[in-house]
Image (cartoon, helix red, strand yellow):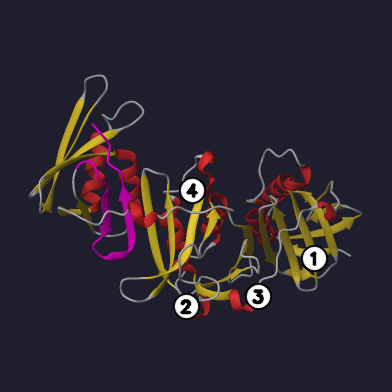
Amino acid sequence: MSAVIETAALRSAVRAAAAVTERRNSIPILGCVRVRADADGVAITATDMDISITTRAPVQTAGELDVAVPAGRLTRVLTALDTGTITLTPKGKDLEFTAGETTGGLYGFPVEDIPVVSADFPKARTFTMPADALRAVLANTLIAVSTEETRYYLNGVYLHGRETHAGTRALTGVATNGHVMSQQDAPLPPAASEAFPVGPAAGYILPRKSAGLLLRMLSTESGDRVEVAIDSNRTKVRFRLADDTELISRFIDGTFPDYERVVPRNFTGNAKVGRRDLLAALRRVSAMCEGKHRHVLLRFDGTRLGVMTKGEEGGHAYTAIPTVSTHPIEIGVNAAYLRTLLAASDAEVTVISYSDHANPLLLQGESEPALRQVIMPVRI
């Protein structure tokens, strides 16, 4: 029986689910989306065997179908069609469609060949939290995730429960690539105590790809919530959004390092700088940063912060911005890394704490205590 669906709604659902598929895939079925329709609507599912995304769209006329068709081809068809409705009709394992005067068909694959990423998600390990809070955790940590495959345990965001200095419980996300580290806290509701217990090695590493896909899906609207569930074996997580979109992901099987050991604590001084001012200064001198490393020297000197660089072919640049620093010092850093950290913050004023030229710098927004960033120094 055919199902009639609004084209725009189906297009949006297919695009969101198909984002998990890889363009170049040696296994054809992993390049497909599963299209299921019944009286409750249409569900679109795609997977890469580690991540599964299911999106939903309402139907105007209910129909029974369950087919697996190439995600790229279906997306191109829906993109080319005008607004209006589309009628989907199963023909064995294939899918035929009609939209106005346009008709066509897509070759299908056996639906039973699609891998299933599923698990048992106990109610005790299920809770809801504000979608914008989870979005902040992911957005402010993904910038520091490592792409080095040999250290696979750094290829994701470490999510765990911890008790803050204020005595509250937080869902904390941390990521590091060995050069920078970013940590973001979000309030953790009491119902999350079973899913994210506070304690050493009680967290999970969410893969970079999963975190990136989820970030794109999460709402920025205040008031929207997301359901989070950890499976019985603590190897998978399910995120369910307000529109019933669902992402299930395996965790990385590894141990995240004790990141607190790299967070500097014994400071000899700090400086308060305008975040936008420092970003602008870095952009100006970065024009002269040549070669592989793109290093700059930060010179803290009471009321001024000097930013300077020397090009490998003899060029140089210097600029300065107002600041209030408590101890004069010169520290070299990677300009690109520092710009990335500053761009992730929304604070007007950034507090940079330091000890000497050989130890990491700690960055915190004056109005953002939930975000901590660390950058390693470089020798210039």
CA distance for labels 4 and 1: 39 Å
**For mark 2, what is the residue?**
189
Question: Label 4 sits on what residue type?
Answer: Leu
Residues at marks 2 and 1, CA–CA distance in whole angstroms: 36 Å
Q: Which x, y percent locates residue 315?
A: 21, 23
Which amino acid, by three-letter code, is at mark 1?
A: Ala
Of the two numbered discs 3 and 4 on the same chain, state the one appearing first in sequence: 3
**Image: magenta residue range:** 357-380
Observer-nearest residue: 116 or 215? 116
* Amino acid type of the residue tagged 2 in the rendering: Pro
In this figure, which residue is indicated by the disc labeled 4? Answer: 154
Q: Which residue is mark 3?
A: 122
**Residue beneath label 1, please?**
37
Work out whether mark 3 precedes mark 1 in sequence or the reverse, and give the earlier one.
1
Residue most extreme to the left = 302
Apparent side of residue 183 relative to residue 229 in the rendered image (left or right): left
The residue most toward the top is 313
SS of the residue under disc 3:
loop
Residue occupying image coordinates x 79% and y 65%: 37
Which element carries disc 4, helix, strand or loop? helix
